[in-house]
Amino acid sequence: MFFSIIIPLYNRPQEIDELLETLTQQTYMQFEVLVIEDGSVNDAADIVASYTDRLDIKYFVKPNAGQGFARNFGFERAKGDYFIIFDSDCLIPEDYLEIVSANLFEHQLDAYGGPDAAHTTFTPVQKAISYAMTSPFTTGGIRGNKKHIGQFHPRSFNMGVSREVYEKVGGFILTRLGEDIEYSIRIHENGFKIGLIPAAKVYHKRRTSFAQFYKQLHFFGRARINIYKHFPSELKLVHFFPAAFTVGLGVMLLLNVFYPPLAYICNFLFLLFFLLIFFHAWQVNKSIKIAFLSVVASFIQLFAYGLGFIQDFFKRIIFKQS
């Protein structure tokens, strides 16, 4: 099987350098790489050129249109039997393609997704963010877990589709705001088999600061409403949890000001929740510092996602604004 690895890129030359370096170390080398520079000001032309003697790599420059349409640009020019999508802030383990190839042949998957994890070289903040996005105590626990709620929807930081899927379903029709979930739903609706490959993990840097993480998760909350506008049945009870957390936090603060006796119950529940996160993160990362930062990251994840969700829920569903 020949793979086409498609990487949209926007003003992140250092990230693509690290990603391409990991691709040179793959134990399975039947692949090409297509880097799509999506209207960047700070481009990676020189960096990509430095890999032409080590990778079958092609570099394209196009006007900015967002990551979904940049991937479509790559799909149209790919030669592979299977298209693999990575975000530019990922590092790929050396046996990734070998694992994927074996699983595709064994399980005959038309599309797949894989989980993400924190690399040992990540900063404590990056490790905490990774924990928040994969923890069973946050909504991140449904992303790439063996046990997931409802249909499995691959995420575009680590996702693959066969050429047959692309030829029948087409590419992305959204460029952002939940474009990967929308694409997965259409693949399901066309009768293709999608599966999780648990061992096909990538090391996903995500954001390097809590401020960037907040902005990203607020965007994710809004994206869930965008998916609902296309597929109403895909809005599940679990998707309301961050919004409930955000509302509960507001109620707790009001009770502490206006009715302290009742506030004790809310305070205890929030404290218990964050203690569970702290001790679980400590067990996972073997670091008190990362455990503390994981509490902060989990708070940001739930609050930012919940706020974005509530914002667009009222704007687009209640008040029906476009």
Image (spheres, rainbow, N blue to C red):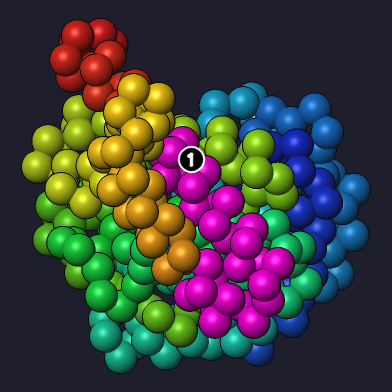
Percent across and percent down for residue 101 are 45, 84
Judging by the rendered image, the residue that carries numbered circle 1 is: 217
Residue occupying the far left of the picture:
233
The answer to whether residue 114 is visible is yes
Magenta segment's dominant SS is helix
The answer to whether residue 182 is visible is no
**In the image, what residue occupies the spot 30% across and 78% down?**
146
Count of numbered marks:
1
**In the image, what residue occupies the spot 62% across and 26% down?**
64
Q: Is residue 246 left or right of residue 91?
A: left
Residue occupying the far front of the picture:
261
Along the viewing direction, whichever of 129 and 32 lies nearer the viewer: 129
Query: Is 281 a magenta residue?
Result: yes
Percent across and percent down for residue 46 are 90, 48
Q: Is residue 215 left or right of residue 320?
A: right
Query: Is 259 a magenta residue?
Result: no
The amino acid on which the numbered mark 1 sits, given as a three-letter code, is Leu
Along the viewing direction, whichever of 139 and 175 lies nearer the viewer: 139
**In the image, what residue occupies the spot 66% across and 67% down?**
290
Q: Crowdedness of circle 1 by 10 Å Cα count: few (<14), some, many (20+)?
A: many
Along the viewing direction, whichever of 49 and 157 lies nearer the viewer: 157
Percent across and percent down for residue 159 are 43, 62
- Of the 4 image quadrants, the one containing the C terminus is top left
- Note whether 208 is above or below 224 in the view shown: below
Magenta part of the chain = 278-307
Along the viewing direction, whichever of 208 and 234 lies nearer the viewer: 208
Q: Secondary structure at mark 1?
A: helix
**In the image, what residue occupies the spot 87% across and 53% down?**
47
